[in-house]
Image (cartoon, grey):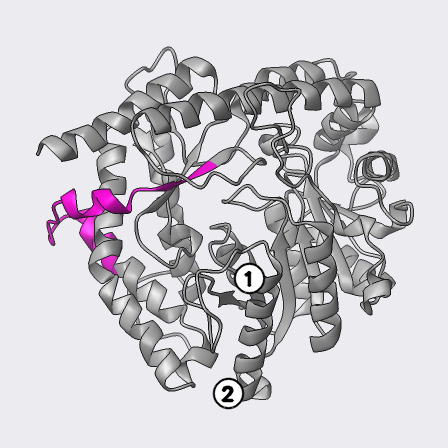
């Protein structure tokens, strides 16, 4: 029942209005014509490759009259799905060739995530996900479908497991299983919802690491044992690069392995319980096109997604651009090589700068556009003003963090109490993290906070280095300027 209120909005509308505040900082972007604008180190895009992807789609033939109609499908034209098949078969090494009838094309992976939640889960069901995690997953899955995340901690794992745990090793699989066991032991899935999906981001966002085949097989066995669906978000598949000074040298870090390249049935998991997500936003520097992809061998899932695609189809002119990007394997190969070299060069530029200024960061990544910075030692230098907007925002953040305490934790005595104690101990840290974020923004630099990525500990930030060189250098100078002013204060 709607409560009496002067607002015209439903509770859903009010939640959406809160999310809309995220866009307030985008109104003054940096450019060569607006040098006082905000440099965006917060949103994950391959800014340095925009000109090359734009040049490719600029050569598209003119739109024909038929493309101004609805078209034959709402889930991607047959031509586009065939091209995606060719791309996947040539780059993901699938055990069996991908067929067009296994693919659903929608307007972005954000919508694909929502579609997964809507078609497979009941309201209140849970998606199992390790920390830290891509910031938008919570909103993508929960906003309309009412699905919750069940977070797996690695710094302070459940039960007898000792942390910190390598999030990409076999011990992490044990941490996932411990979380499943505790949840099902201390909750009633009929009332609280059950864990139904295990979600991997491979390559990982924000840590930039690829899962090894051995670990992926272990997750398949875990899903088979606990009757879970395995969903693998592989949107950074072709954005893996060498972190060596010499591009010809191996850096010893794992390369990308798709779940499609592993026969899940050998690990006891039926093929139709593996779902793969992809899109053009990252590897093709084309986030503005809004083209996302879902792969599933389940006819049942496919039919359900088709029914929902009426709300989320990619427009025909958009599909024409996507077809142009995917239609020439030689162009794709050249573009990917250029992108990897750009990422390697910018990664080295940014990491050399960070080391020069003694800024610690997670050094095991070799994929994506980001670095995971450890600014915990700067938090005590941040002054708090309880009246300012950043502190108020941090208080809301703390409340959100406490709400994310899993039902299993709440129900398990000392473990839940210990987690709650850690959250309370970190309350000042979360406020300082938010205040430091505000200091960056005041200096016209946007960084993503660790709290937004479900970090267990305050003080981490994600920095996007896939920039044009001039902008990268200027952004790094703004970044270190903030930290130096804190030291001098």
Q: Is residue 308 magenta?
A: no
Where, by quadrant of the figure, is residue 476 drawn? top left
- Quadrant in which the N terminus is drawn: bottom left
- Front-most of residues 285 and 25: 285
Q: Which residue is mark 1?
A: 129
Q: Is residue 305 left or right of residue 181?
A: right
**Chain part drawn in magenta:** 371-395
Residue 114 image offset from top left, x and y in percent? 61, 57
Q: Is residue 141 left or right of residue 460?
A: right
User: At 65% across and 49% down in the image, what residue appears?
Assistant: 211
Residue 301 image offset from top left, x and y in percent? 79, 62
- Quadrant in which the C terminus is drawn: top left
Mark drawn on residue 251: none
Marks 1,2: beta carbons within 8 A: no
Placement of 245 over or under 69, stated as above or below: above
The answer to whether any part of residue 265 appears in the image is: yes
User: At 22% across and 42% down in the image, what residue appears?
Assistant: 378
Where, by quadrant of the figure, is residue 88 drawn? top right
The answer to whether any part of residue 144 appears in the image is: no
Whole-number angstrom distance, CA of label 1 to CA of label 2: 19 Å
Q: Secondary structure at mark 1?
A: strand
Q: Secondary structure at mark 2?
A: helix
User: At 62% across and 20% down in the image, what residue appears?
Assistant: 247
Q: Spot the residue most to the left.
A: 489
Placement of 127 over or under 449, stated as above or below: below
Where, by quadrant of the figure, is residue 422 drawn? bottom left
Pointer 1: residues within 10 angstroms few (<14), some, or many (20+)? many
Mark drawn on residue 186: 2
């Amino acid at each position: 029942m709607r409560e009496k209120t002067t607002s015209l909005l439903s509770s859903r509308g009010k939640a959406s209005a809160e999310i809309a505040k995220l866009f307030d900082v985008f109104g003054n972007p940096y450019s060569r014509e607006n040098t006082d604008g905000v440099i965006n180190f917060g949103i994950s895009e391959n800014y340095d490759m925009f000109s090359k992807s734009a040049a490719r789609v600029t050569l598209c033939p003119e739109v024909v009259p038929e493309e101004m109609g609805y078209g034959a499908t709402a889930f991607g034209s047959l031509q586009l799905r065939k091209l995606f098949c060719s791309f996947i078969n040539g780059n993901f090494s699938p055990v069996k060739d991908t067929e067009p009838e296994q693919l659903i094309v929608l307007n972005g992976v954000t919508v694909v995530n929502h579609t997964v939640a809507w078609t497979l889960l009941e309201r209140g069901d849970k998606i199992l996900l390790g920390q830290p995690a891509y910031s938008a997953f919570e909103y993508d899955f929960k906003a309309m479908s009412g699905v919750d995340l069940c977070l797996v901690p690695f710094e302070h794992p459940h039960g007898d497991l000792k942390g910190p745990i390598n999030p990409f090793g076999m011990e992490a699989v044990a941490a996932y299983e411990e979380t499943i066991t505790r949840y099902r032991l201390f909750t009633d899935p009929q009332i609280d919802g059950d864990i139904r999906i295990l979600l991997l981001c491979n390559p990982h966002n924000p840590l930039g690491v690829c899962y090894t085949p051995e670990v992926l097989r272990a997750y398949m066995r875990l899903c088979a044992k606990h009757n879970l669906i395995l969903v693998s978000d592989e949107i950074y598949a072709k954005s893996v690069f060498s972190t060596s000074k010499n591009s010809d040298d191996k850096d010893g870090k794992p390369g990308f392995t798709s779940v499609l390249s592993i026969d899940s049935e050998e690990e006891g998991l039926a093929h139709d319980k593996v779902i793969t997500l992809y899109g053009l936003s990252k590897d093709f520097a084309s986030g503005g096109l809004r083209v996302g992809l879902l792969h599933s061998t389940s006819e049942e899932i496919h039919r359900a997604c088709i029914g929902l695609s009426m709300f989320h189809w990619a427009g025909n002119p958009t599909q024409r651009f996507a077809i142009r990007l995917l239609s020439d394997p030689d162009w794709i190969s050249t573009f990917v090589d250029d992108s990897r070299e750009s990422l390697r060069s910018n990664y080295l530029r940014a990491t050399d700068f960070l080391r020069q200024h003694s800024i610690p960061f997670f050094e095991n990544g070799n994929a994506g556009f980001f670095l995971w910075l450890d600014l915990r030692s700067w938090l005590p230098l941040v002054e708090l003003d309880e009246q300012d907007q950043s502190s108020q925002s941090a208080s809301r953040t703390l409340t959100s963090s406490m709400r994310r305490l899993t039902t299993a934790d709440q129900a398990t005595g000392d473990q839940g109490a210990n987690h709650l104690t850690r959250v309370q101990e970190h309350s000042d840290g979360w406020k300082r993290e938010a205040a430091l974020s505000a200091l960056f923004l005041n200096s016209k630099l946007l960084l993503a906070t660790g709290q937004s990525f479900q970090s267990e500990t305050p003080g981490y930030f994600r920095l996007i280095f896939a920039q044009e060189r001039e902008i990268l250098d200027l952004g790094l100078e703004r970044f270190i300027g903030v930290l130096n002013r804190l030291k001098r204060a």
